[in-house]
Image (spheres, helix red, strand yellow):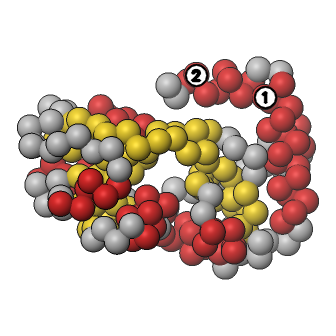
Amino acid sequence: MRPEGVTAHVRFVPWARALEMGSRGEVPGILSCARNADREKYFLLSEPISYAEFGFAALASREVKKINHLSDADKYKVGSIIGYTSSTELTDAGIEHDLSPTDRVALKKLEAGRIELLYSELNTTRYLVKTELEGVNLKYFLMGKRAYHLCISKQWPDAQSLLSMFNAGLAEIQADGTFDSIQRKYQ
């Protein structure tokens, strides 16, 4: 953030690779991370930078009953993305699931019928369907909301200082309205 004199360079890579690079300190940080115990071993998490809905997506044409809990998905072929918190939650709940390297690949599997449910962040799912999967209609089963953070690698030199500078810059742009202006562009 410029007010603090730090310039960020963003590079897009598959999520599992981003986690690996960050945990080894090859990059200063990764965007954006949900909090979980495994991540906190390797990363310092900023104050929340966004909130997102997570849950299941299914083809509207499929016979999928209402899903209120993770356990309700156990009777379906479920997919998720490698390294996502949603995959960890499925594993912890004992639900077998197919793993994809990206949201795009997982959605293609859903469209092709290789999975019946995709458990992931729903805003991303809706955006990708809208922009890349013309004619595909999905129904959504909201499971909740979660906060997302900038994750600073604990292996990066002076990581705590970098986190403090980020949080200070974040507080500044939240206070002056810049943060809300940026958020509105993506809604």
Q: Secondary structure at mark 2?
A: helix
Residue 56 screen position, x and y as percent: 31, 47
Residue 177's place in the image compared with 131, above or below, is above
Q: Count residues near mark 1 (Cα–Cα under 10 Å), then give few for <14, some for 14-19, many for 20+.
A: some
Left or right: 52, with 67 as reference point: right
Q: Is residue 135 visible?
A: yes
Q: Which residue is mark 1?
A: 174
> Which amino acid type corresponds to the residue marked 2 in the rendered image?
Arg
Left or right: 168, with 109 as reference point: right
Q: Is residue 2 visible?
A: no
Between 8 and 155, the one nearer to me in the picture:
155
Between 59 and 68, the one nearer to me in the picture:
68
Q: Which numbered disc flags the more N-terminal residue, 1 or 2?
A: 1
Residue 102 screen position, x and y as percent: 37, 59
Q: Residue 111 — which label? A: none
- Residue 182: image quadrant is top right
Q: Secondary structure at mark 1?
A: helix
**At 26% across and 53% down in the image, what residue appears?**
72
Residue 125 screen position, x and y as percent: 35, 42
> Which amino acid type corresponds to the residue marked 1 in the rendered image?
Gln
Q: How many marks?
A: 2
Q: Which residue is mark 2?
A: 184
Residue 156's place in the image compared with 9, above or below, is below
**At 29% across and 31% down in the image, what residue appears?**
130
Quadrant occupied by the N terminus: top right
Left or right: 165, with 92 as reference point: right
